[in-house]
Image (cartoon, rainbow, N blue to C red):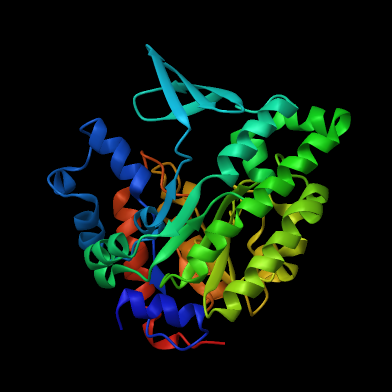
Amino acid sequence: MTFRERTLRTFQHKPVDCIVYQPRIEHWYNYNKARNTLPERYRDMDLLEVYDDLNCSIRPYHYYSQCRARENPPDLDIEVQRDADIETVLQHTPVGTLKSVIKHTDLAQHQIENPIKTHKDVDVMEYILRNSKIWFDMEKFKEIDEMVGDRAAPMVFYERVNMQRILLDYVGWQETVYLLADDRELIERLVKIIDETDEGTMEALLNSPIPIINFGDNLDEYLLSPRLFEEFVLPVYQDRGERFRKAGQFTQSHFDGNVKHLLKYCQRCGIDGFEALTPKPQGDLTIDEMKEALGDNLILLDGIPMTAFLPSTPEEEFERVTREIIETFSPNLVLGISDEPSPVCDIERVRRVGEILREYETSVTAQ
């Protein structure tokens, strides 16, 4: 079987000859490439060549998400001002202007001023969202699918769900907390606008050839409390899961960080799997808690804590936790690293996981 076939059959709960392994080394590769610190073996390889050398699959949503096309309103004028490492973005529309400020480093960026502060800003964001056009670019899909080949089954990001977009992109965590207490109407109105305008993305993906949809929400209960998750996010997940399932597609969500008190919703979300659940010592979960939440019907993507790949972690501990994840979650498992290898990880341990997996080839049976 190819990586592509194994991934699809895992989501279909059909037998596979070996668990798929997708270590998500993009951050490790990009960081070390930029600093000229890649190991000698990989210095002249591009990212896909490194994956091929490691003999593992890719998590390809970064590629296929380029197929989710968006056209801004024709009367939206985006003005970008740059002063050293500070970038100011002004979005001018007929109903007003939104201002965002972003701080850049050589390898990352962070939004330090969010675009929505007032009801007037909500008016402007609503104008932009309701007058944007969203579609699935089939020509881009064909181009990317040819490049990816059998390295993986196609996956795509769905934009962040209502409250996560508000917390991380539009308003900010502290400001959202204040507004929920002082001006809840603003937050509820913004949630409604996001949910309604997300229908464009929904329709585009429902009518696409992408079999696996990733809700890239980066959920963490320190940002999104269980109460807010149940009120705002759970109904959206349940609706999306049902509609994608009827279309023959699969869904998964990115739960990383601290999620112990969100686990109780896993079986209620109506989706097929959860990505990046992170066991101790990096996350706040035990492996038993993860298994209890996922049961025998939900798929785990990733699972091995990133700390196991650090040179400071004993080799024996790395091997032990890797085998425990494989034995606990197979066959409902797309093995990977929670959440992504550090730039200083031991890349040969990444390779070693694939070797360990092959020891289990004959014992994989679907449930």
Q: Is residue 296 above or below residue 239?
A: below
Q: Is residue 17 above or below residue 57?
A: below
Location of the C terminus by quadrant is bottom right
On screen, residue 79 versus residue 268, left or right, reads left
On screen, residue 293 versus residue 276, left or right, reads right
Location of the N terminus by quadrant is bottom left
Q: Is residue 172 visible?
A: no
Q: Residue at x 39, y 54 (%)?
A: 24
Residue extending furthest toward the top: 83
Q: Is residue 1 above or below residue 7?
A: below
Q: Is residue 86 above or below residue 254?
A: above
Q: Is residue 299 visible?
A: yes
Q: How many marks on residues?
A: 0
332 or 251: nearer the viewer: 251
4 or 256: nearer the viewer: 4
Q: Residue at x 44, y 49 (%)?
A: 70
Residue 6 locus on image (x, y percent): 38, 79
Residue 308 locus on image (x, y percent): 46, 51
Residue 112 locus on image (x, y percent): 56, 22
Residue extending furthest toward the right: 181
Q: Residue at x 70, y 63 (%)?
A: 289
Q: Residue at x 41, y 85 (%)?
A: 16
Residue extending furthest toward the left: 44
